[in-house]
Image: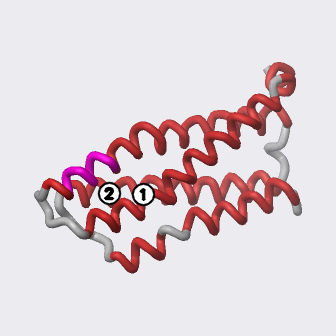
Amino acid sequence: MQELLSSIYLFLKSGHVIFMVFWLAGLFMLPRQCIYMLDHLPGSPGEAKWATRMGKLRTIILTPSLIIVWVLGLSMAYGGGWFASGWLHAKLTLVLVLTGYHGWLVAQTKKMARGERPLSEKTLRMIGEVPGLLLVLIVLLVYLKPF
């Protein structure tokens, strides 16, 4: 199995990067959509429109991309025999944090779709930066492999 994964490494890597971009784009968009929803009263047609948009983003882009990123990333790590590498442990830790952020953000958008407003605009703007900060750290770990 490891030999097969090694032979298709570049395809795995390409898919991993493509779906990572989709996933991160969705994570950048979702807090922004929440901000737009704040302009609409609970139960209004505008709120319903944003709730639908956020639901589609979650089910069509975010969650499938998350799953594919994990499957392809773990396949590459297994095929490359990298599980003993310190940089991979650090990267996986950051990707776990990003996955937790994803889950937390999805929960917040579902609350908003029910008419709740758990987060302020200022908070949404601040948390919208989380994926970017994690992306910088993850990319540095992957390319520099410092340990």
The rendered magenta stretch, by its main secondary structure, is classed as helix
Left or right of 30 on screen, residue 99: right
Magenta stretch: includes residue 144: no
Residue 68 figure quarter? top right
Callout 2: few (<14), some (14-19), or many (20+) C-alpha neighbours within 10 Å?
many
Residue 31 lies, in percent from the top left, at: 41, 63
Q: Secondary structure at mark 2?
A: helix
Residue 73 figure quarter? top right
Which amino acid lies under the numbered mark 2 shown in the image of this protein? Thr
Q: Tell me the quadrant of the picture where the C terminus can be found.
A: bottom right
Task: Give the foreground label among 1 and 2.
Answer: 1
Q: Tell me the quadrant of the picture where the N terminus can be found.
A: top right
Which amino acid lies under the numbered mark 1 shown in the image of this protein? Leu
Residue 107 sits above or below residue 52 on the image? below
Residue 123 figure quarter? bottom left
Q: Mark 2 highlights which residue?
A: 109
Looking at the picture, tell me which residue is in the foreground, 60 or 76: 60
Which residue is located at x 41 percent, y 64 percent? 32
Residue 86 lies, in percent from the top left, at: 82, 56
Which residue is located at x 57 percent, y 45 percent? 22
Q: Mark 1 highlights which residue?
A: 30
Alpha carbon distance from label 1 to label 2: 8 Å
Q: Secondary structure at mark 1?
A: helix
